[in-house]
Image (cartoon, grey):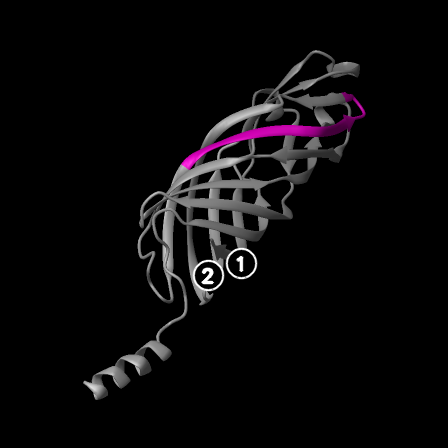
């Protein structure tokens, strides 16, 4: 019995100190993310106003509530500001940057965690919806100002993994695909009142950060 007790104590001393994800836990993550738009256009935007949206690297905060050991609901919070370029040559303008626009896309996903109690590798996948709010729109061209619809609803897919490094602390890698679309119109000059088409941004979001379980 004494030998068994000693063996148990030794085993406990060398057991992994990382915490396991259980139902009712709240997980908070802080990531650095790169928002990389996968842009397509339709309507007049395709010809003559071919447009593009540049990528941006920003901080992101998210919270996951574990409904069960394997099912979690994650709310993703972050905002990014992007340069926009357009080709206006067919309208008598130039080609290049026309300004910037800020994007706020709070996203809610339902996740499946494959191995929430693994000591080294805890992968997950998720699917959900994003609501995107466009703000601080500053788009101007030599043929007139440009504005966008301020609200967008779309889908979201997600895959990622947590790598425990200490009790309640882990490294996180995460990739998301968001579907974001907005209508574009002219508000002054030669394009005043003209619907210029639809801009599909549909970014890939690559994240790396640190998380903690509460």
Decide if residue 176 is in sight here.
yes
Rendered view: 4 above or below 212: below
Regarding mark 2 in the picture, which secondary structure is present there? loop
Give the main secondary structure, helix, strand or loop, of the magenta stretch. Answer: strand
Residue beneath the point at 43% across and 58% down = 162
Rendered view: 159 above or below 150: below
Residue beneath the point at 70% across and 11% down = 193
Residue 166 part of the magenta-drawn span: no
> Local crowd at mark 1 within 10 Å, few (<14), some, or many (≥20)?
some
For this orientation, the residue located farthest to the front is: 2
Residue beneath the point at 71% across and 24% down = 90
Rendered view: 29 above or below 183: below
Residue 136 part of the magenta-drawn span: yes
Whichever of callouts 2 and 1 sits on the residue coming sooner in the sequence is: 2
Read off the magenta span.
128-144
Where is residue 104 shown, x and y percent of the image?
61, 34
> What number is the disc on residue 210?
1
Q: CA distance from mark 2 to mark 1?
A: 11 Å
């Amino acid at each position: 019995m004494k030998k068994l007790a000693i063996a148990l104590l030794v085993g406990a001393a060398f057991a992994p100190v990382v915490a396991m994800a259980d139902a009712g836990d709240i997980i908070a993550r802080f990531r650095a993310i790169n928002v990389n738009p996968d842009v397509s256009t339709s309507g007049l935007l395709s010809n003559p106003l071919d447009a593009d949206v540049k990528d941006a690297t920003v901080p992101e905060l998210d919270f996951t509530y574990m409904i069960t050991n394997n099912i979690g609901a994650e709310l993703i919070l972050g905002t990014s500001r992007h340069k926009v370029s357009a080709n206006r040559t067919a309208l008598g303008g130039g080609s290049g940057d026309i300004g910037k626009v800020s994007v706020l896309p709070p996203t809610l996903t339902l996740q499946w965690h494959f191995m929430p109690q693994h000591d080294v590798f805890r992968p997950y996948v998720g699917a959900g919806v994003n609501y995107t709010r466009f703000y601080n729109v500053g788009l101007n061209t030599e043929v007139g100002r440009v504005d966008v619809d301020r609200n967008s609803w779309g889908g979201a897919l997600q895959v990622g993994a947590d790598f425990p490094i200490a009790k309640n602390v882990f490294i996180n890698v995460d990739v998301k695909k968001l579907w974001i679309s907005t209508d574009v119109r002219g508000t002054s000059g030669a394009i005043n009142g003209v619907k210029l088409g639809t801009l599909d941004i549909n970014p890939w979001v690559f994240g790396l950060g640190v998380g903690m379980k509460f």
